[in-house]
Image (cartoon, rainbow, N blue to C red):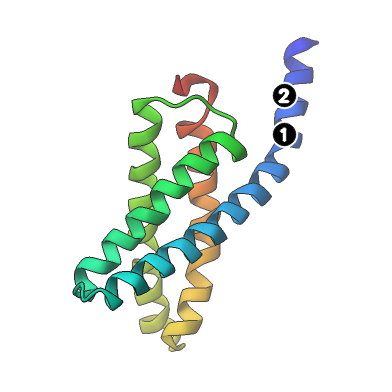
Amino acid sequence: MIAESHGRTARHAMPRQFVRYLVVGVANTALSFLVYRLLLIAGTPYAVAAPVAFLAGAVNGYVFNRRWTYAAPDCTRARVLYFLFAALGAAATSGLVMLVVRTAGVGRGEAYLVAVPPVTVATFLANRIWTFSDRSG
């Protein structure tokens, strides 16, 4: 009975966690864009500014998702997995954008809007299942 009750609680937590994950994602995007713009203003080459800005958003995402979205302990394994999934998500987004542009004949902006939702769901689930699960400690 306890395991069944815990399973129901865990299932009910997923929608709340997903909404929190989305809120953190919006904050990450805003922070990344701000860092990118500030670095450009400071004269940093865009090819350097872009990954530094992405990293700033990823660090913010790790801290807030770990603490607020998943309420999980901090550990090396979680840090490594979170940044691995962030990098894989960035690569998957790029790949999907290229695929959609080349195969569906839509614009680059529209292709990005098509690519982001499935990658967001995939990274949320990966982090929920592997990064911040009970076995992550």
Q: Mark 1 points at which residue?
A: 11
Tell me the quarter of the picture where residue 80 sits: top left
Could you tell me residue 137's position as x and y percent?
45, 19
Residue found at x 50% / y 82%: 110
Drawn side of residue 90 relative to residue 125, left or right? left
Amino acid type for the residue under numbered disc 2 = Gly
Could you tell me residue 105's position as x and y percent?
43, 89
Amino acid type for the residue under numbered disc 1 = Arg
* CB atoms of marks 2 and 1 within 8 Å: yes
**6 or 30: which is nearer to us?**
30
Considering every residue shown, the one lying at the far top of the view is 1
Drawn side of residue 76 relative to residue 136, left or right? left
Viewer can see residue 88: no
Q: Name the residue under label 2.
A: 7
Characterize the local packing of mark 2: few (<14), some (14-19) or many (20 or more) Cα atoms within 10 angstroms.
few
Residue found at x 48% / y 20%: 135
Residue found at x 46% / y 88%: 106
Question: Which secondary structure lies at badge 1?
Answer: helix
Question: Which secondary structure lies at badge 2?
Answer: helix
Mark-to-mark CA distance, 2 and 1:
6 Å
Could you tell me residue 127's position as x and y percent?
49, 39
Instruction: State how many labels appear.
Output: 2
Viewer can see residue 22: yes
**103 or 82: which is nearer to us?**
82
**66 or 6: which is nearer to us?**
66
Could you tell me residue 85's position as x and y percent?
39, 46
Work out whether 89 lies above or below 12. below
Work out whether 2 lies above or below 116. above
